[in-house]
């Protein structure tokens, strides 16, 4: 049963991430938690609301890790991209922006 709950949490977090991506918003732990709160407010039933609460609680355990490591992670990713200069970076999947 634990596996099912964890997979459901991951699915709901993925849904929250897609909602943010489609609005071209930053995807990080804090924005995911805010999106899950919105989803909870609009939940269609008690089961769905409880699943969203479980996903939000699971994600909250990463708030401190995210804020502590995000600066280091961002600079590490940028360094890797600048080293690649056109190898795999050119084939990266990019979401369309509002300007396109």
Image (cartoon, grey):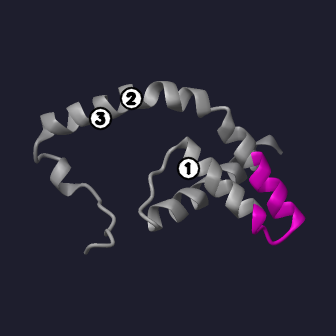
Would you call the spot at circle 2 few (<14 residues within 10 Å), some (14-19), or many (20 or more)?
A: few
Residue at which label 1 appears = 31
Q: Residue at x 53, y 56 (%)?
A: 17
20 left or right of 96 in image:
right
**Which one is closest to the eye, mark 3 or mark 2?**
2
Give the residue displayed 83% in from the left and 45% down from the top.
1
**In this figure, which residue is indicated by the disc labeled 2?**
71
Mark 3 or 1 closer to N-term?
1
Where are the magenta residues, as a range? 41-54
How many other residues sit within 10 Å of disc 3, few (<14), some (14-19) or many (≥20)?
few
**Residue 55, above or below 70:** below
Q: CA distance from mark 3 to mark 2?
A: 10 Å
Vertical arrangement, residue 57 with respect to residue 51, above or below: above
Residue 11 visible, this orientation: no
Foreground: 85 or 97? 97
Residue 9: say if magenta.
no
Residue 44 in picture, x, y percent from top left: 81, 72
């Amino acid at each position: 049963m634990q596996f099912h709950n964890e997979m459901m949490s991951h699915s709901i977090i993925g849904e929250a991430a897609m909602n943010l991506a489609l609005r071209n918003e930053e995807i990080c732990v804090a924005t995911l938690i805010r999106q899950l709160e919105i989803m909870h407010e609009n939940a269609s039933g008690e089961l769905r609301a409880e699943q969203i609460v479980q996903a939000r609680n699971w994600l909250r355990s990463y708030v401190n890790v995210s804020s502590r490591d995000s600066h280091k992670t961002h600079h590490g990713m940028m360094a890797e991209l600048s080293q690649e200069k056109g190898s795999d970076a050119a084939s990266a999947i990019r979401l369309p922006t509002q300007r396109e």
